[in-house]
């Protein structure tokens, strides 16, 4: 294994700046910033986020950094934790396909907390630091491989995201290259994130990006003070790749650096649930709409699920077909299929505790059959295709194959659609005129000024 992977990756990311990035990349960084603000502001209203907010108020640590969607101002580490938790709570934040990792929820949380505490940081420097964090976390997630992470019970959003947070923080703090390398090395001892939340619908997944943001911030601060970390934290004998994957692909850490940027390979979510459910729900919605179907017309819904997501949205069977909580529902393919058929939508209004216990939803879940299909595995994880076959009461069948779910880079939400998503989500916590002002000022205002509008 190349003994220099960590150094090479850090060396490249250290040089990333507004002047080195293509206009398309900077535009995507603004695009995902709006998406992040939408999910963070709306997510701040969730009880899981409010628990974190109450904890911060109990600690009584005032500062400059905003907890979005609230009036709380606190120290940057706490703000990063709170906003990372809030932005992940409604399962509508961005996802990098190749790494199966949520990037914006971590990177924007740490960047915004630092930018508010250091008002002179420009919008361009803020966005470039986020792009670098995206690049680090995505490449590390691809190198350990998402299927390998899940098989060992780890959640890439925290285990890999914390490295990206350290890079983002290091750039905004103006650390030297050697200090940045130390921050990444320190971060290796902060990589955690258990998938056990799935067993009982617990809230712990929601804090993963918050912890990644907070820990990355702290790693960079330690490095700034001269604290050292292992220089080969990724490829070393006891490093991250060996510890967190049975079959790592270390070449993905550095292959093609600078030829493109992983932020361009990142998707957004139109549906309020797990990324592995997005494509199948798209297919179901298209079949229902194109054929004018209603629940009584349907006898069976066969959904092909990617193998990497099988144990996340299909197993254990009893739990997926009888969810007890909103978290259970967010990771239940039968539930997602049922609300898509019944309501022609799978948003926040469908993923509620009331819907979880409705007999009508349970009835449609009983019509859902989950299968594995080798044909949809061939292009994963570069692509996340889906196939759905619906059997009708009249004996006919309707089938739909979705190569690129809505929100993928190849099938993106337009800027206008992203603005609509922002209005729909942030509008539940902020007045309409404030939402419009945020949309208008996002392109030019300093991040600290944008954050002030979100509180």
Image: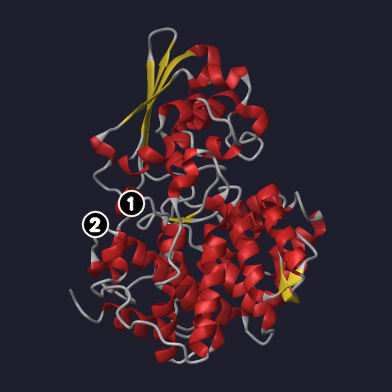
Label 1, on which residue?
A: 152
Q: Quadrant of the C terminus?
A: bottom right
The spot of residue 371 in percent (x, y) is 32, 28
173 versus 321 height, above or below: below
Q: In which quarter of the image is the N terminus?
A: bottom left
> Visible in this render: residue 455?
no
Taking the image as shown, residue 87 lies to the left or right of residue 333, namely right
202 versus 247 height, above or below: above
**Residue nearer the viewer, 350 or 419:** 350
| Measured Cα–Cα span from mark 2 to mark 1 | 9 Å
Disc 1 element: loop
The spot of residue 67 in percent (x, y) is 71, 65
Please report contact status of discs 2 and 1: CB closer than 8 Å, yes or no: yes
Q: Which residue is drawn at 45% across and 65% down?
A: 161
Colour scheme used in the picture?
secondary structure
**Residue nearer the viewer, 454 or 50:** 50
> Visible in this render: residue 283?
yes
**Residue nearer the viewer, 189 or 69:** 189
Disc 2 element: loop
Label 2, on which residue?
A: 246
């Amino acid at each position: 294994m190349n003994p220099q992977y960590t150094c090479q990756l850090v060396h490249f990311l250290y040089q990333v700046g507004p002047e080195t990035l293509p206009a398309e990349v900077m535009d995507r960084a603004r695009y995902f910033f709006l998406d992040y603000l939408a999910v963070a502001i709306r997510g701040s209203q969730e009880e899981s986020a409010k628990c974190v907010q109450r904890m911060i108020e109990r600690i009584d640590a005032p500062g400059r950094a905003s907890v979005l969607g609230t009036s709380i101002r606190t120290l940057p580490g706490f703000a990063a934790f709170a906003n990372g938790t809030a932005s992940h709570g409604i399962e509508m934040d961005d996802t990098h396909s190749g790494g199966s990792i949520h990037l914006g929820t971590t990177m924007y949380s740490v960047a915004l907390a630092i930018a508010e505490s250091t008002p002179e940081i420009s919008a361009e420097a803020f966005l470039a630091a986020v792009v670098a964090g995206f690049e680090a976390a995505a490449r590390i997630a691809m190198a350990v491989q998402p299927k390998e992470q899940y098989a060992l019970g780890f959640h890439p959003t925290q285990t890999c995201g914390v490295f990206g947070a350290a890079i983002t923080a290091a750039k905004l703090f103006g650390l030297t290259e050697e200090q940045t390398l130390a921050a990444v090395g320190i971060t290796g001892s902060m990589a955690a994130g258990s998938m056990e939340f799935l067993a009982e619908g617990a809230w712990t997944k929601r804090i993963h990006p918050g912890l990644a943001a907070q820990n990355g911030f702290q790693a960079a601060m330690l490095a700034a003070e001269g604290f050292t970390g292992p220089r080969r934290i990724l490829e070393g004998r006891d490093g991250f790749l060996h510890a967190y994957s049975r079959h790592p692909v270390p070449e993905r850490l550095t292959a093609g650096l600078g030829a493109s940027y992983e932020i361009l390979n990142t998707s957004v979510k139109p549906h309020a649930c797990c990324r592995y459910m997005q494509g199948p729900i798209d297919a179901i919605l298209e079949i229902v709409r194109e054929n004018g179907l209603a629940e009584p017309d349907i006898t069976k819904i066969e959904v092909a699920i990617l193998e990497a997501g099988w144990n996340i949205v299909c197993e254990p069977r009893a739990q997926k077909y009888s969810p007890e909580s909103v978290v259970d529902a967010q990771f239940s393919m039968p539930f997602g299929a049922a609300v898509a058929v019944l309501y022609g939508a799978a948003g926040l209004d469908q993923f509620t505790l009331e819907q979880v216990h409705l007999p009508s939803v349970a009835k449609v879940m009983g019509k859902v059959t989950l299968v594995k299909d080798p044909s949809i595995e061939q292009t994963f994880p570069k692509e996340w295709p889906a196939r759905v076959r619906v059997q009708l009461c009249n004996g006919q069948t309707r089938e739909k194959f979705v190569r690129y779910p809505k929100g993928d880079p190849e099938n993106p939400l337009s800027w206008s659609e992203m603005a609509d998503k922002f209005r729909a989500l942030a509008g539940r916590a902020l007045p309409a005129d404030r939402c419009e002002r945020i949309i208008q000022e996002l392109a030019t205002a300093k991040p600290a000024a944008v954050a002030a509008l979100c509180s």
